[in-house]
Image (cartoon, rainbow, N blue to C red):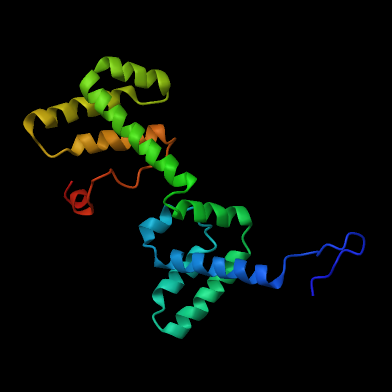
Amino acid sequence: MRGKDPETGEYLGPSRSRQRREALEVLALGERLAELSEAQLARLPVPESLLPHIRQCRRITSHIARKRQLAYLAKQMRREDDDTLHAIRDALDEHGEAARREVAAMHRAEAWRERLLDGGDEALARLLAEHPDADRQRLRQLVRNAQEERKREKPPRSYRELYRELHRLIAGGAAPAAEPGEGDAEDELA
């Protein structure tokens, strides 16, 4: 029993039904984490203490053993604070705040890349005014190389590198997962 406050008559803690619902939500979150690839998992704010349990879950193929390991993973996850679990859920949610920020940073990086390629030194001066810690020489070289690639119809290696550099600059140091429309096979060739 969870007991009642003798003065107000209110219940002291959450009901068993609520505790069970919360535990099942954490279990479902653990299942989602176990289904992710290592690269996807690296992008999430998952504490280091949970990573070995998630990897162990992936390795187990037997149904009952996997179910038992998922339950153990959920138990370990329930030991984390609510803010950590909320941050993980938000990062997994494609409509969450973290996803919106990431998409906005991608769009800003793409817009700056096009401005730099079309506007030249004036656009670079505006970018450096907004981000004084940027490497002027590297950006100028990437812009020149990307323009040259366009003229000669070469593979867009510098074009992509310029995007990565801009995204890193705009997102505050976080490297982008991949440029929109950029395939895994292209990365291996570049």
Marker count (numbered): 0
Left or right of 63? Residue 118 is left
Compare residues 182 and 10 and report the one nearer the observer. Answer: 10
- On the image, the x and y values in percent for residue 130 come to 41, 21
Q: Residue at x 18, y 46 (%)?
A: 190
Q: Residue furthest left?
A: 152
Q: Position of residue 158 (x, y in %)?
A: 21, 35
Relative to residue 149, is residue 171 drawn left or right? right
Q: x, y (%) of residue 109?
A: 33, 33
Instruction: Judge from the rendering whether residue 114 lies leftward or rightward of residue 74; answer left or right.
Output: left
Relative vertical location of residue 40 with respect to residue 150 in this rendering, above or below: below
Residue 62 lies left or right of residue 115; in this view the side is right
Q: Is residue 73 visible?
A: yes
Residue 14: quarter of image:
bottom right
Q: Residue at x 66, y 72 (%)?
A: 17
Q: Quadrant of the N terminus?
A: bottom right
Q: Is residue 94 above or below residue 179?
A: below
The answer, for residue 174, to whether it is visible in the render is: no
As drawn, 28 above or below 152: below
Give x and y (percent) for residue 83.
Answer: 60, 52
Q: Given the current orientation, which residue lies at the most extreme front position? A: 9
Res 164 quadrant in image: top left
Residue displayed at 35% across by 17% down:
126
